[in-house]
Image (tube, grey):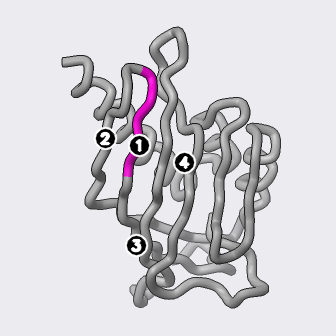
Amino acid sequence: MERLLAERACERLILDFVHRLDLGEPSSVAALFTEDGTWEWPEGDRLVKGRDALRQYFGSRPADRLSRRMMSNVLVEVVSPDTATATSYFTTYRIDGHEGDMVPAGPPVQVGHYRDAFHRRRDGTWLLSARVLHLAFGGPTPHARPIT
């Protein structure tokens, strides 16, 4: 039962992350990480470390960005009572410069996967300790800002 509860808690973090980016306050994703948590995008040579840096990074997302991420193939593996890892696939639809009207559907701008590490705190709460983004398709040009 403990393993199932840990898996569900980690799955919930994965979904909460994209929900906050797409429909909530993007900077609030920092609260889903440990104090020294990291977000890494190796292909973009980007590493963001620590809650304050994560809050600033995700909070700098353009206000006129409309995005929706589809999450699938979530596989959580409990490594120990206090650690877990996961791989999950994502597809991102995004438009910058959105002015509030419904827009025609276009192709996804990115498809890839996240590789996550989780840590359970003493109070039993699970948090992301590391998230690494891997793009298989699409993505910004090498000089553009990685997706958030």
3D distance between C-alphas at marks 1 and 4: 21 Å
Q: Which of the marked residues, 2 or 3, is nearer the chain's N terminus?
A: 2
Q: Type of residue at label 3?
A: Thr
Which segment did they paint magenta? 82-86
Q: Answer few, some or many: residues within 10 Å of disc 1's Cα (few below 14, many 20 plus, some between 14 and 19).
A: many
Taking depth in this image into account, of 86 and 31 the one nearest to the observer is: 86
User: Which residue corresponds to mark 1?
Assistant: 85
For residue 36, above or below residue 116: above
User: Which residue corresponds to mark 3?
Assistant: 91
Whether the residues at callouts 1 and 3 have beta carbons within 8 Å, the answer is no
Q: Which of the marked residues, 4 or 2, is nearer the chain's N terminus?
A: 4
Q: Position of residue 57 (x, y in %)?
A: 77, 55
Taking depth in this image into account, of 81 and 53 the one nearest to the observer is: 81
Q: Is the stretch drawn in magenta largely helix, strand or loop?
A: strand
Whether the residues at callouts 3 and 4 have beta carbons within 8 Å, the answer is no
Horizontal arrangement in the rendering, residue 49 relative to residue 73 (left or right) = right
Horizontal arrangement in the rendering, residue 35 relative to residue 8 (left or right) = right
Tell me, yes or no, whether the highlighted magenta stretch contains residue 85: yes
3D distance between C-alphas at marks 4 and 2: 24 Å
3D distance between C-alphas at marks 2 and 1: 5 Å
| Residue projecting furthest to the front | 80
For the point 62% across and 70% down, the residue is 147
User: Which residue corresponds to mark 2?
Assistant: 77
For the point 41% across and 43% down, the residue is 85
Q: Position of residue 132 (x, y in %)?
A: 56, 58
Q: Which of the marked residues, 1 or 4, is nearer the chain's N terminus?
A: 4
Which dot marks residue 141? none
